[in-house]
Image: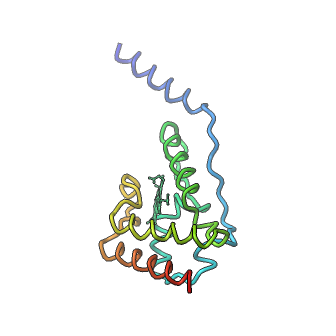
């Protein structure tokens, strides 16, 4: 009996792998990227790369488990949604007001610990931001917002 339940479980895990789902496209060549086009201090760009770029850029990395259903259903969905809201790879093609809105959100969400989303840091310790890191990102975002309208 136990053996049958196990086999059914294995069969389900195998079968769900065939459920089609588009993997978010990856590109390393992004001429409108924030870090490429703007003068971002190195400590900030390192933190953004480590803590945000997997979801909010075209440079997402996909470790093996991220391509296995049901994990991939959640991850692919998160990445598509995150890129729709904010994609650092397209930064320089945005309107000034949209950049301003995003910088305002970045400043608040990072300071309050809402970003990166919970769960991500469990498997990505390099995305764990200290209070000082959060304050640095928030201050950078505020200053960049101001400089947009200079
Ligand atoms: C594991 C994926 C993931 C990571 C890593 C991540 N985010 Fe997000 N982010 C999301 C998702 C999903 C959304 C959209 C849903 C939501 O708002 O919760 C989002 C939404 C946002 C928004 C709101 C955009 C808007 O104006 O509607 C901002 C700003 C943001 N993230 C900034 C960041 C910053 C800055 C980092 C790095 C410090 C980061 N995120 C790291 C997944 C992620």
Q: Farthest top residue?
A: 1
Total of numbered circles in the picture?
0
Above or below, 91 against 139 in this view is above
Viewer-proximal residue, 80 or 84? Answer: 84
Viewer-proximal residue, 17 or 100? Answer: 100
Is 135 on the left or on the right of 148, as rendered?
left
- Quadrant assignment for the C terminus: bottom right
Q: Farthest bottom residue?
A: 150
Q: Farthest left residue?
A: 131
In percent of width and height, residue 117 lies at 40, 56
Is 44 on the left or on the right of 23, as rendered?
left
- Quadrant assignment for the N terminus: top left
| Residue at horizontal 54 percent and vertical 29 percent from the top | 14
In percent of width and height, residue 35 lies at 58, 76
Is 136 on the left or on the right of 85, as rendered?
left
Is 141 on the left or on the right of 94, as rendered?
left
Coloring scheme used = rainbow
Above or below, 69 against 29 in this view is above
In percent of width and height, residue 66 lies at 51, 47
């Amino acid at each position: 009996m136990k053996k049958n339940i196990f086999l059914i479980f294995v069969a389900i895990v195998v079968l769900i792998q065939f459920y089609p789902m588009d993997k978010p496209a990856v590109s390393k060549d992004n001429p409108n990227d924030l870090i490429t086009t703007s003068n971002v201090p190195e400590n900030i760009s390192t933190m953004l790369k480590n803590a945000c770029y997997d979801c909010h850029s075209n440079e997402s990395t996909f470790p093996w488990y991220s391509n296995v259903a049901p994990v991939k259903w959640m991850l692919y969905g998160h990445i598509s949604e995150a890129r729709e809201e904010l994609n650092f790879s397209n930064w320089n093609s945005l309107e000034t007001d949209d950049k301003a809105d995003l910088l305002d959100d970045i400043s608040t969400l990072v300071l309050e610990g809402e970003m990166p989303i919970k769960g991500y840091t469990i498997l990505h310790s390099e995305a764990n931001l200290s209070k000082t890191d959060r304050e640095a990102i928030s201050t950078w975002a505020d200053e960049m917002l101001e400089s947009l309208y200079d």
